[in-house]
Image (spheres, rainbow, N blue to C red):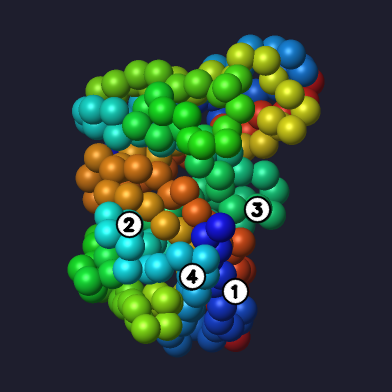
Amino acid sequence: QLQLQESGPGLVRPSETLSLTCTVSGGSISSSGYYWGWIRQPPGKGLEWIGSIYYSGSTYYNPSLKSRVTISVDTSKNQFSLKLSSVTAADTAVYYCARHMSSKGGDYWGQGTLVTVSS
Amino acid sequence: DIQMTQSPSSLSASVGDRVTITCRASQSISIFLNWYQQKPGKAPKLLIYAASSLQSGVPSRFSGSGSGTDFTLTISSLQPEDFASYSCQQSHSTPLTFGGGTKVEIK
């Protein structure tokens, strides 16, 4: 059974960089046809796609965040990571990692991790 | 960006009721439409992909229909465990976008 687990600091200071890692177990991050994405959900609000990466390293970002986002993959560790720079309180959210195909929804998700931006 | 509009934003229903949630895309997305269920404090769960395909393990009381810009999620007979929020998402093109969600509450 594929499992995804987010890890990283739960509190980030304004203007600093948010860094999260998603560890994939029970399957390979290098499986053909699957993308690995980050999605966030501010408290009480809807879901927002941040971006996705293919195991080859190809990345796809939400234009609304593109200038601040970097997603990378480490196939040797079966992990992919998110960096979001220059954070503000508006970046406070539960951050999820998920697996999806190019035209299919996310079929496996991490449990989510709350990241609060505050001084 | 493709905007996804869901309606209603919330509804009250009883166990056994037939429930319908709609999702409209701002432009045609063919059948690249997914539906999720989300319970408080939990990650979204994929119910329907490609507008009408039931994800493995999802009860058959859930069904999806539509193509182009108009889509529907139907729960044929609402069960106690179905009280949750439901969101649509288009996977036609990036940025992937979600609807605002529909909260299904107990009447």
Marks 3 and 2, how far apart in space?
A: 23 Å
Mark 4: amino acid: Val
Along the viewing direction, whichever of B9 and A104 lies nearer the viewer? A104
Q: Mark 4 — residue?
A: A24
Of labels 3 and 2, the one closer to you = 2
Q: Residue at x 56, y 70 (%)?
A: A5
Closest to the observer, B6 or B32: B32
Kindly identify which chain the residue marked by label 4 belongs to: A
Q: Which residue is mark 1?
A: A116
From what the image shows, is residue B89 above or below residue A111? Answer: above
Q: Do tags 2 and 1 sit on the same chain?
A: yes
Mark linked to residue B42: 3
Q: Earlier in the sequence, mark 4 or mark 2?
A: 4
In the rendered image, the quadrant that contains the N terminus of chain B is: top left
Does dot 1 land on a helix, a strand or a loop? Answer: strand
Q: Quadrant of residue B41?
A: bottom right
> Of residues A109 and A83, which is closer to you in this image?
A109
Give me the C-alpha separation between circle 3 and circle 1: 18 Å
